[in-house]
Image (spheres, rainbow, N blue to C red):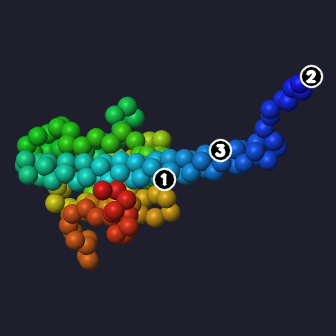
Amino acid sequence: MQELKQKAFTLVEMLVVVAIIGILTTIVVVSVAGGRKKALATKAKADMMELSKGYEMAASEGCRTIKFDTAATTGGSLTCASGTGTDKIYANIKSAPQGITYSVTIGSTTVTMLADAAWSGNIPAATINSGYTFSATGFSTGIFTCNDGSTTGTVPGCSCDTKDRCEEVK
C-alpha cells in the first residue's frame, strides 16, 4: 500500500513570505508619503506664483489700488479696488494645503490662512506700489516666497527657501 504524503508549507517558509510582504509594504508607504509632501509644496508654489502674477498684471493694466478680499465662499481674491479693471479678480486662492500656512502682505497689512481654515482678514485698498510679499510656510520651514523687492535686502521675484526645496517643487 502506498502512503499519501500531504504537502504543506513549513513555518519558516511562511515567516519568510510574511517578512518579504512587510518590507515591500514599507517601501510603498514611504514612497507615497514623499510624493504627497512634494505635491503639497508644488501647490503652494503655484498659489504664490498666481498671487504674484495677478498683482503684477493688475499694476500693468492701470490698477491704482488693490485689495485682498477674503469672502468665505470664494477664498482669497486679489482684486483691483480703483483704476482700470476695478472689481476684476486677478488671483483667487481658495485654500492652503494641509500642513502649510499662506501669508499675504500688501503694504503694511498681513493676513494668513492655515490649512483648511478661513483667511484671518481682509486687506482693504492698498496703493499698488506699496509693496507685496506672498509666502507659503510649512513642514517646519519656509517653502516659497514672492515679493516685489521693496523690502530692504530682497530681490524681486519668486524663490524657494533653499536649493533643495527648489528642486523639490519644480
Is tag 3's residue or tag 2's residue first in the polypeptide sequence?
Answer: 2
Q: Amino acid at mark 1?
A: Gly
Q: Which mark is residue 21?
A: 3
Q: Name above or below for residue 126 compared with residue 148.
A: above
Taking the image as shown, residue 144 lies to the left or right of residue 36, namely left
Which residue occupies 28% across, 64% down? 159
Is tag 3's residue or tag 1's residue first in the polypeptide sequence?
Answer: 3
Query: What is the spatial separation of the Cα atoms under label 3 and label 1, in whole angstroms?
Result: 20 Å
Image position, residue 94 (x, y; %)? 36, 39
How crowded is the residue under tag 3: few (<14 C-alpha within 10 Å), some, or many (20+)? few
Image position, residue 37 (x, y; %)? 46, 52
Question: In terms of secondary structure, where does tag 2 sit?
Answer: loop
Query: What is the spatial separation of the Cα atoms under label 3 and label 2, in whole angstroms?
Result: 42 Å
Q: Amino acid at mark 2?
A: Met
Query: What is the spatial separation of the Cα atoms under label 1 and label 2, in whole angstroms?
Result: 62 Å
Q: Nearer the viewer, residue 36 or 62?
A: 36
Q: Which residue is mark 2?
A: 1
Question: In terms of secondary structure, where does tag 3 sit?
Answer: helix
Q: In the image, which is nearer the foreground, mark 1 or mark 2?
A: 2
Q: Name above or below for residue 19 compared with residue 162.
A: above
**Can see residue 104?**
no
Q: Quadrant of the C terminus?
A: bottom left
Q: Amino acid at mark 3?
A: Ile
How crowded is the residue under tag 1: few (<14 C-alpha within 10 Å), some, or many (20+)? few
Q: Which residue is mark 1?
A: 34
Image position, residue 111 (x, y; %)? 38, 53
